[in-house]
Each structure stands twice: as C-alpha cells, then as structure tokens.
Image: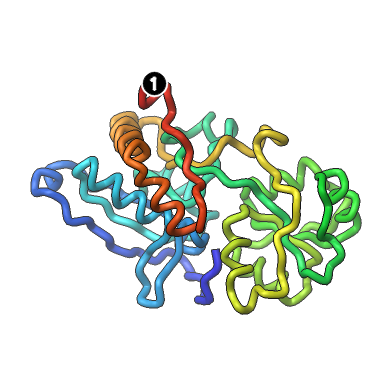
Amino acid sequence: MFRNVTRLAGVLSLCATLAVPASAQEQPEVRIGTDGGYEPWTSMTSDGELTGFDVELAKLVCERMKRSCRFTAQPWEGQIPALEQGKYDILVGGISITPERQKRLAFTQSYANLPINFAAAKSSGLNGKATWPELRAALVGKTIGVQTGTQSQKFMDNELKGEVTLRLYDNQDSLNLDLLAGRVDAALAGRSPWIALTRSPQGEPIEVLSPNLDFEQFDYLGVGVGGLMRKDSDDLRKAWDEALCTLKAEGEVKRIAEKWFGFDVSVKPDAKICGA
C-alpha cells in the first residue's frame, strides 16, 4: 500500500459517480468508503483519484447492479464508526472477514485472500526461517511495528504480547517509513503492502519474511476479505453478492487481481450464495 503521497488529514471526499443507465438514478446512491492508502487494494493517483483492486472491482459491481456509486476516502481507523453512523453503505479495501466483526456488522461473500507477513531489512538476520516457531524465536526482544486496529495487531497481541516492543501506527505509510529508517526491527502487515513496497526503488533494502501467516494456522485471522456493511443492509448485500457471483464466474475478479497484485488472489464463488 505504498504511495509516496502525504496521508490525507481528515476525510477527503472523492466523487466517483459511475455512468449507469437512467433507471439507476431512481435508486439511492451507494456510498462507498475506502482507505485510499492501502495499495494495491486501494490508493490515490497523483491527480487525487481513487484507484486500486477494490475500487476497480466495486465499480464493476455497481455497473452490474445498475446502481450509481460514490466513493469517499477516509483513514481506516474512522471508517467503521462512520459506517455505523450511516455515512457509508459499504466499506471496501482489503477488509478481513472475522467472527468479531461479524457479530455487529455484515460482510459480502469473500472475494480475495492473502496472508500476513513480517517484513524486515535484508541485513536484519531475520530471513530464512522456515516455520513460525523459528521466526518467533528470532523476533523475541525486537521492536516490531504494526498498524493499529488491524488483523496484524491482533496477531501480535495473540502471539508475541510482552515479548517484543510493539510500536503502533495510524497508517501503513508511517509504518513503512520507520521500517525503512530502521526505527523498527521488523513490521507486520498484509502481504500486499509489502509487495508494493519491495517493488518500489526505496523498498529495495526490504524483504518479505517467511513463513506466510494465514487462517489455516491462525483461525482468528479470518477467511479472506469482503465488503463490510451494516446488518440492516440486507437488500444491498444480496445485490452485491449476486454481482460478485457473476464477476467471479466470468473471471473478472481473477483478471483484476492479476492486474493489481501480479498473481491471482481471488476466492471461488461461495456455494451457499452463488449455488453449486
């Protein structure tokens, strides 16, 4: 998630009303909240436009639903409260589906999945660990950076609490800067931000550490990402899921994933929702 632009201070509203048939204008506009700073899920162009995997996919969903949609960029830490207060109808942007979140909110079906990984300088001596117990032993006593309110923070609280110095960050950009500057020994985030960072010129000294950490090993990490909405949005959720079923079947989700990630992160259609 790595643009080299200054983090938005406060909320920047970005209008992205899609060109849809006139009949769509008879239905309420779908208000979509996203981070704008979690590349390649969601990011900002130099012209201040929202882009990324989730933005492109959401636009296709809106077209299939024949609905007008408007995107707004807001830092992650304020998105869920804003959703609950009725500012948005749905949030997108690499949001993990977890039982904890499902207790109070609703998700669309999962459409993509990636593990979380530690990243560190190539010179750190933390590379080459084949298993989590090996890497865990090497991390004990280190200073680790993580973005607050994420599955990565939950992982740290569950697996390394009290055994490392934990530094929390409001956004991925700040975490990246401290990792590059050597102010933390390692950092933990979804694999996608590290892909973007290590592909950039400034990220050349950084590497993604093995092993991958995922739901199969740590069930509290969730089963993938989905669109997040209020539980009273059943009609929108059903329409969104129906569009996702079609886009998955047509290979569109896979195509967009390969465009933004360089490989397929798409999830198969949910048989309970899309049918066998």
Label total for image: 1
- Residue depicted at x 88% and y 50%: 163
Please give the residue where the numbered disc 1 appears in the rendered image. 276
Quarter of the image containing the C terminus? top left
Find the residue positioned furthest to the left: 22
Judged left or right of residue 30, residue 267 is right
Does 20 appear above or below 216? below
Colour treatment of the image: rainbow
* Pointer 1 local density, CA inside 10 Å: few below 14, some 14–19, many at least 20: few
Judged left or right of residue 245, residue 138 is right
Q: Quadrant of residue 72?
A: bottom left
How far across and down, in percent of the image, does residue 25 sit? 13, 47
- Residue depicted at x 35% and y 38%: 244
Quarter of the image containing the N terminus? bottom right
How far across and down, in percent of the image, does residue 124 sit? 84, 68
Q: Quadrant of residue 48?
A: bottom left
How far across and down, in percent of the image, does residue 192 sit? 57, 56
Using the image as rendered, state which of residue 249 and residue 11 is in the foreground.
249
- Residue depicted at x 72% and y 44%: 155
Instruction: Label 1, secondary structure: give it.
Output: loop
Using the image as rendered, state which of residue 189 and residue 33 is in the foreground.
189
How far across and down, in percent of the image, does residue 81 sit? 48, 47
- Residue depicted at x 42% and y 68%: 44
Judged left or right of residue 163, residue 234 is left
Looking at the rendered structure, the kind of residue marked 1 is: Ala
